[in-house]
Image: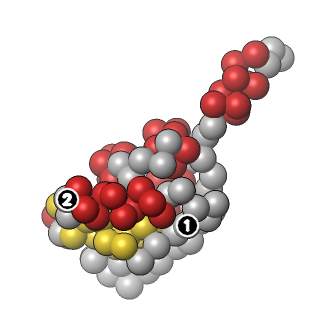
Amino acid sequence: TGARDEDGAMNAAQTIANSSLVKTAFFGEDANWGRIVAALGRSDCRFDPDRVSLFFDEIQMVENGVGLGPRAEEKCSAILRKDRFTVTVDLNDGLETAEVYTCDLSLDYIRINADYRS
């Protein structure tokens, strides 16, 4: 949320959702906000990293580009144990939003595709 334009919002959301490192963090129940922000940085969306806020469900993990510490990380890791959860990245730079769905990247997925030969 909070992007300058609709294209930027969608590009940021899709880049995060398609990141293999983000997906493996989700599988490992690791509230690794750095992977999410790194994916955001790879997107074409313009943003100020010092204004970014990040939430796992209703628990804030990052405010103004700074992680909120081990206690927030612990609460967010508990959220990642659920079958479904929401990650909200607020760029605090506009009114545009985008919503995408994603999934984790499990060991079984890697094994199946590592053994698959076309």
Please say if the residues under marks 1 and 2 sit with CB atoms less than 8 Å apart.
no
Compared with residue 110, is residue 55 higher up or lower down, i.e. above or below?
below
* Residue extending farthest bottom: 95
Residue at 42%, 67% in the rendered image = 56
Q: Which residue is mark 1?
A: 85
Residue toward you, 85 or 13: 85
- Residue 27 in the figure: left or right of residue 67: right
Quarter occupied by the N terminus: bottom left
Residue at 70%, 31% in the rendered image = 108
* Residue extending farthest right: 118
- Residue 6 in the figure: left or right of residue 65: right
Residue toward you, 77 or 60: 77
Q: Amino acid at mark 2?
A: Gly
Residue at 55%, 66% in the rendered image = 85
Whether residue 58 is visible here, answered yes or no, is: yes
Describe the element under mark 2 as helix, strand or loop.
loop
Displayed quadrant of residue 68:
bottom left
Q: Which disc, if any, is residue 69? A: 2
Q: Position of residue 29 (x, y in %)?
A: 48, 49
Displayed quadrant of residue 75:
bottom left
Describe the element under mark 1 as helix, strand or loop.
loop
What is the total number of numbered labels drawn onto the structure image? 2
Local packing at callout 2 (Cα closer than 10 Å; few below 14, some 14-19, many 20+) is few
Quarter occupied by the C terminus: top right
Q: Position of residue 57 (x, y in %)?
A: 46, 73
Whether residue 52 is visible here, answered yes or no, is: no
Disc on the earlier residue, 1 or 2: 2
Q: Amino acid at mark 1?
A: Phe
Compared with residue 33, is residue 6 higher up or lower down, i.e. above or below?
below
Q: CA distance from mark 1 to mark 2?
A: 20 Å
Residue at 39%, 53% in the rendered image = 31
